[in-house]
Amino acid sequence: MNLLNDELKRLQRQYRDILEFAKNKITTEPQTQILNEILMFWFENKKVVECALNWLSVLPYETFIFTAAVNLDYDEMDYIPFLMHGRKHILDDPVFKFAIANDSSKVLGIEFEKTTLHNVQEAINDNIKILDNLNELIYILPVSDIFTPREKETEIATAMICSMFNSSITSYQSYIEHCSNIKDVLNHLTPDASSKMVLNGPEDLRIDLSKRIEKFCKEAKHLKLDMFENEAHMLWVGLFSYILRASSVYQFCHKYKTVPFFRYDIVWHYFSMMCDAYAHKNNIELARELQILSFRAKVSFTSGKVLDRSKFENISINEFINAKESFNFEHKLLCAMDKTNENQGLISIMCEIFSEFYLYFKRQEKPTVTTVI
């Protein structure tokens, strides 16, 4: 175990050097060349990463993965709600995701470099800050994209989209044959599609689905309509990209018994749909595991929305970790949920526990000592 721990530390140091090089060269050398070096580094160390994952996730559903996000924003203190849960923590490397996307864009003929340079720079800078300031608290590893088979992800994503349509839509091919505009899409949806289809982040599902689809097509900045045949095609690609991400996370977390920490509502929505769907496969053991996985993901996702990060400004990470561990947040939360009635929602319970933690943390702060001469 000590040898593996040493190897993981070495890997993080090497990656820190590569990121520093990328930071200094990203504006003067081709972005593709920089990202390809990051791709090569992780693929060359794939065996070490896999061993590290098995070691870090030895306790089922106690290792949390910050995933399905552009980056973990260090300056915005994204690490605070993330570190509130679990025993081990991994950042699903966002720079590696950009490298994968850049590599795929060559095949698709998309101008990747011009549209993503700023985001790539931000992800590199945040990764460096994490490695410098949160060393051994958060490990940066390329998990969901390097260890999940793309064919299976595609199969799952396609099946989930088709489940929102009537029996005439069974594949992407049948979708484009029947749907050339949004009116066609609406005519082929199932009655419960309105509660399944989420497109614009936090959504009021009471709003008519046709209006939500229209809003998506107008506001989806990451999709340019001139790249697609029509709005129906654009809708499929948008849905597919969201669900593909959720599928990748689901497969990885189920395989390694880890818990995803989501920052965005859309991917969380489709991930929870997958857990619910697979939990009803008449497999009692699988259903129990997915209930644990879904519950822990829901709790951590909610805490990211509720936690007031400003309470922890200007304190050291060690002070925060010590207070969190001695307060035993997750244990208190679970106990509170056992004692309260079903009508009290998770957010309400969590707000109460966090209020207790803020007071506890304030009492733990070291008083300022004034020296009188």
Image (tube, rainbow, N blue to C red):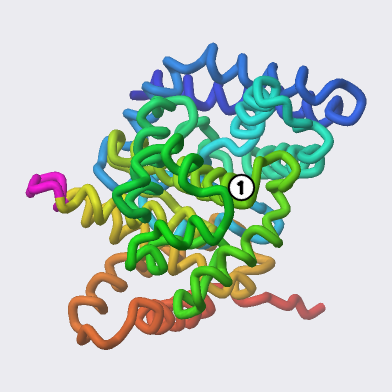
Q: Is residue 288 left or right of residue 357?
A: left
At label 1, which amino acid type do we have? Met
Seen at 88% across and 21% down, the residue is 29
Residue sitting at 63 percent across and 46 percent down?
Answer: 70
The residue at 45%/74% (across/down) is 205
User: To which residue does mark 1 refer?
Assistant: 234
Which image quadrant for residue 132? top right
Tell me, yes or no, whether the highlighted magenta stretch contains residue 239: no
Image coordinates for residue 229, horizontal then vertical, percent: 65, 41
| Looking at the image, residue 296 lies above or below residue 158 | below
Where is residue 115? Give x, y as percent.
79, 40
Residue 252 x %, y %: 36, 36
Q: Secondary structure at mark 1?
A: helix
Q: Main secondary structure of the magenta part?
A: helix
Region of the chain picked out in magenta, as a range: 281-288
Q: Identify the residue at horizontal 34%, vertical 47% (top origin).
A: 168
